Amino acid sequence: MKKTHIIAILVIAIAFGVILTSLSNNSTYASFKEATGSPNHTYHVVGKLDRSKPFSYDPHVNANLFTFYMIDKDGSERKVNLNRPKPDDFEKSDQLVVIGTAQGTDGFDAADVLMKCPSKYTADSISTVKQSSM
Amino acid sequence: MNGVQYIGEQIGWQYAGNSFVFLSFVAAIFSFICYVISASGNELEGDNWKKMGKIYFRIHSVAVIGIMTTLFCMIFKHLYQYHYVWEYSNDAMPRRYTLACFWGGQEGSFLLWTFWQVVLGNVLIRTSGKWQSPVMMTIALAQAFLASMLLGFHFKGITIGSNPFMLLRDIPGFAGSPFVSMPDYASKLAPTAQGLNPLLQNYWMTIHPPTLFLGFASTIVPFAYAIAGLWKKKYGDWQVEALPWTFFGIMILGTGILMGGAWAYESLSFGGFWAWDPVENASLIPWLTFVGTGHMLIVYKSRKNSALSTFLFPMITYILVLYSTFLTRSGILGNTSVHAFTDLGMSGQLLLYLVFFILLSIVLVVINWKRIPRDKQEEALWSREFWMLLGSLVLLMSCAQIIISTSIPVTSKIAGWLHRIQPLFGDFLEKIHNQAPPVDKIGFYNKWQIPFAILILLILSFGLYFKFKDTDMKQLWKQIRLPFVVSLIFSVASAYFLKETNWFYIILLGMSWFAVCANFYYWVKNKKANFWKAGAPLAHTGFGLILMGALISTSKEEIISVNTSKKSVESMGKNYSDATNILLTQGDTLRMGDYFVTYTGKEQKGKDILYSIEYMAKDSQTHKYSQLFTLHPLIQLNPQMGNVAEPSTKHFLSRDIYTQITFADLSDSKAINPNTNFTQPKTQTISVGDTMFSSNGIIVLTGLDTHPDTAKYHLKQGDIGVGAMLKVTDINNKVYTAEPIYIISNNMVQTIDADLPQLGLKFTFPKIDPETHKVDIAISESKNTARDFVVMKATVFHYIIVLWLGCVIMVIGTTLAIRQRIIKNREAKKEAQPA
């Protein structure tokens, strides 16, 4: 057998290993219900901030804890404890992705949150900008 | 149009801009057609077509310059009736960011890319000689694709390109806005202009994008040569021509990526120089295969070996540039990256661009598969070409891992789509569809990339000691013995000194020392330390230093803003282990690592709120603080885009102290009624000379003032007033005085409080015992909310300077290598001519 063949086989083997382990190692998207079902696994949960309930951040008690309520795509709600200071402009966020594990039946401990702010192009935001300045 | 006669609109710019856009597109297509015909015919016939292709490319170049000039003037003249100007600039922004506004948007950055390819194309027309037609045809085609991104052409619901010369009132989202019906709106838009994202208002924004895009643009040169080789069925002549271009591109793209890292480190709140963010990865991916390209070209030039790889590597590189562009601009990364562009409706076009060049590459390779020369004999195990090939393959695999993991949003989308349209592999597709990006990106990628980094360093330590064809191994071991021993000593010493315990890190550290020592020694020994010949060894040394710096600063990254008062953390349970942000109340001092840190105050400068964070040392004998340095991390206020925190870093030779505000109360704290925020007073009975404690100070009653200032305290005739003279020493040994007053007026006891706003203390003097001369002093402390505070994070990066040093050395080394290549090519041509 030629050396190049050996190398080729090695490369392919390693590449396969890389692909398979990359695929199995990652976290997955899930709903709150699924996350509650397996509380030891880390999930990404997509949802919206529940604006009817308060969110709280008191850095004097704990600078690394911010709590809020989020409703996922299936409509179930959890109290999310985020292990971070309150992100700037959190109130304005449209869509949220929380990353963490379920805690009990009504809680979710998040290590991180990703926020998607509403597009600047909504007619609403622009007409308010216009009116206020003209 | 709604029949309104607009006043003050400068429509001329739009006509000019659109004409240039259209011209640039059409001229690029004509140039492409002429060059294709020229490249397909024989030499003689092709000559006229070549001239035509050249003329059209020149016209295209003028048109591109025209587009850029028009857009630049519009921004410079603040013509806010144009959407692009309104969106990316405003009056408040300093002039020096005009260029940054220019490429702040997608259209502008496409223009930048187009511009660099125009420059490269014009240089190639001069220098590529007989390769001009087949090379320029690819470049002209790419230019046509890029120019189409700016067309803004609507046809039966399909939009082609996004035009930067659109009037604000023509943008669909603004159709219902009240300004559309105002005839003189153009002059009133200035206050509403959005302005450049504050994140981008930075000098890095003026130098980073041009560098990065020149790097991206330069990947087309070896690609165009590879296509030309296949097209003309000349499989072995182009590699020499493409070689200097490739290393030029490697150097520029590398510089661009590292500038991005430096930018992130200096002024973005990523918490480091490399966060493995999808957008960062997208720029790194093509660089890795580009480096592979360069080395395969060297192999071919020296040994006429591995011809197939010299075609595949440039193709993969260019396709990856297009794929990266697709990733960052199609909006597909939306949920996973902090700074990807949003979709402007160009994703379909980008996908077409990408698929076209993938198919073109595959078809050309397949057609020529049988004719591409194969190696007659295998490379020897101990030959430089074999190890270069191996190194390029390792780079390719490292690149593959980054691509697979960064593409999770893409594979998820494809799997979801496949799942919907057909019933097979349901569970598997479902699983892929639900894939989420790694939770701990930095940990995840570091774990994967460290083994690749170790292999690469091993290969480039030995690399230059191997000779082409075959190597006398005895000679090699003899030569490499000294650098090996030296690097072993350095590795053990540095691992011990840094207290590294992770074996992967220790091996990587050792390998990077070996790479640095071996390449440096090679230069001294084999190149006689001649600066002009330092090229390859110096570039390799720099690369070793970069990885060494990255390893040390990452593995020894030390977050010093850890909550040391255990009270709040312990009660929260194991899920709240991250206590890296700390509350710092104004005036308080907290210990962080070797430092004592105080938040002394804030001030507003324009849009920026600067926080003063003072770092101090404490003398162990006298317990006195001495100021070391003050950092000014800031928060930039931006109601339109959201506030942005910018870190501040103190650089030392051995360490950087990086400080970032992670939360600050931006509401006006003065509005809160101070009286409602005091704790219940604590009363103590003391004599003169006694000491009391508040939570933030030591209070000593130094004496009683029997004749307080009657005017100051509005004492009436006959009133008896006594003042309690208090000396308050805070934790920084600053001394304050306060004097609460006790008054007997008409047999009634009155008190006048004394405030110490700096410490949030209030003193009341309610009682005095005339016999014992003991007095009651009541202390109320302001609840912390009344005092200003910040939540901050402080990180020490050790020896990050090694990384920056490595960057500079690698850039110098690569530049020297390019210079050597160009000189050698010229000499070779001169030798060939007389014969």
Image (cartoon, coloured by chain):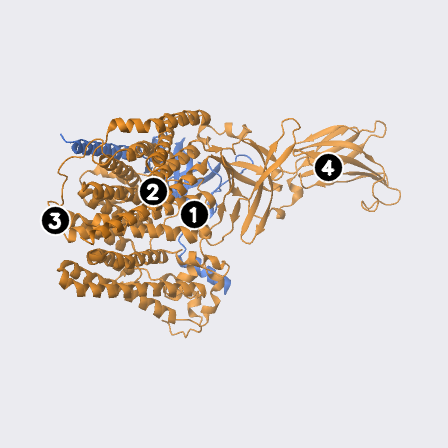
Residue nearest the viewer, comparing B317 with B55: B55
Against B814, residue B654 (above or below) is above
User: Are labels 2 and 3 assigned to the same chain?
Assistant: yes
Going by the numbered disc 4, the residue's amino acid type is: Phe
Residue nearest the viewer, comparing A125 with A25: A25
Name the mark on residue B763.
4
* Distance in Å between CA atoms under marks 4 and 3: 92 Å
* Distance in Å between CA atoms under marks 2 and 3: 41 Å
Q: Colour of chain A?
A: blue
Chain ID of residue with mark 2: B
* Distance in Å between CA atoms under marks 2 and 4: 76 Å
The N terminus of chain B - image quarter: bottom left
Residue named by callout 2: B533
Going by the numbered disc 1, the residue's amino acid type is: Ser
Give the letter of the orange chain.
B
Horizontal side of residue B356 vs B193, given as left or right:
left
User: Are labels 1 and 4 assigned to the same chain?
Assistant: no
- Find numbered disc 2 in the image and state the secondary structure of the residue it sits on: helix
Count the marks.
Answer: 4
Residue named by callout 1: A93
Name the mark on residue B367.
3
Q: What is the quadrant of residue B682 in the picture?
A: top right
Question: Horizontal and vertical percent for residue B208?
Answer: 40, 50
Q: Are marks 2 and 4 in contact (CB under 8 Å)?
A: no
Task: Tell which tag, 1 or 3, sits nearer the viewer.
Answer: 3
Question: What residue do we see at 13% from left, 43% from top?
Answer: B373
Going by the numbered disc 3, the residue's amino acid type is: Ile
* Distance in Å between CA atoms under marks 1 and 4: 45 Å
Task: Tell which tag, 1 or 2, sits nearer the viewer.
Answer: 2
